[in-house]
Image (cartoon, rainbow, N blue to C red):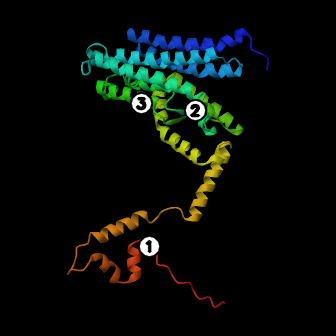
Amino acid sequence: MAPSTPGIRLLPNAITVLAMSAGLSAVQFAIVGMWGAAIGAIAAAALLDGLDGRIARLLDATSKMGAELDSLADAISFGVAPALVIYIWRFEGARGEWIGDRGGWIVALVFAVCMVLRLARFNTLLDVEQPPYAKEFFVGVPAPAGGLLLLLPLIVEEQVGRDGWWSSVPVVVVWTVGVALLLVSRIPTLSVKSIKVPPRAVAPLLVLVALLGAVIITYPLAALIAAMVFYLGHLPYSVRRYLWLAKHPEAWEVPAADRRAIRRAHGVANRRLGLHQPLRGRVAGAALRVARLPRRNGVDPTKMAVDTGPRRRNWRKLGLRRNQPPKDTGQD
């Protein structure tokens, strides 16, 4: 590929600057009370942030300056700007009487600092050798998702059109701190850029994307709420997938269809080997009931359960099977 011209090399950085400008504009919209515009500005910054890196790789225009500029823009657009929007919306003035302006400012600072720490860790991990499957995951919640998650109480209030428990000061405080902890956590989250689809699914997927685009344009706030709830719901699946890949090196470099085959093969092998534990709860429950029986005439109830009654019945109560002697087949 021919070297990129200076004009092409400037394009990804220009998109990054636009994303940073959109994030900062959200603060100005919040100051004048235009909450819908503030939410839209943060969402636009997230969209632009998803484009600049891909365009840079597509045009072979990656650079050290672009990488540093992208991290600084993310810190402003998804760390400082959402924290200021939440502070102005809920903690500034009389609305923050429960915790006060100073307490609300501390909460906003916690989120902004956690966002900067998350970006610093991300840049550090770029130079550390990771397992092949690690490229499919982020460590913690990524910056754009964290910035939009922080605004979820504000988005719900704008959609519903009134205050509620979701916008009360205690809930917003707990939510802000919780999202900040997700940013600096080590929870693996799926990376969208690693998702691949088979060729036959491209056309239906494009139709679905068109429908989603129509829904987002028609009901933007409701679509954002649904997207944030879906993102939070995918976290258990992401953790499970990460742990499974860590235990199965043979699935690291194979397509998704082959991974499903490996997972099915492991499931069949486990069933054939009898690795499931069907008697775990039954044995423990039966033994506990026997141990709780009262003594009768000085006789130990555990001995009664073994020495009295049909033996086959006692074994069945414990959920066990007696070892049967081999049958005589009449052959030497």
- Circle 3 — which element? helix
Residue wearing tag 3: 181
Residue wearing tag 1: 320
Residue in the foreground of this view, choosing between 52 and 69:
69
Query: Going from the N terminus, do you reach mark 2 or mark 3 first?
Result: 3
Q: Residue at x 63, y 48 (%)?
A: 260
Q: Which one is closest to the eye, mark 3 or mark 1?
A: 3
Give residue 276's position: percent from left, percent from top: 51, 61
Residue 44 visible in this rendered orientation of the protein = no
- Circle 2 — which element? loop
Q: How far apart are labels 2 and 3 at the CA level?
A: 19 Å
Q: Quadrant of residue 191?
A: top right
Q: In the figure, 21 relative to 293: above or below?
A: above
Residue in the foreground of this view, choosing between 239 and 134:
134
Give residue 294's position: percent from left, percent from top: 23, 73
Q: Which one is closest to the eye, mark 2 or mark 3?
A: 3
Amino acid found under the numbered disc labelled 2: Ser
Q: In the figure, 105 relative to 210: above or below?
A: above
Give residue 194's position: percent from left, percent from top: 62, 34
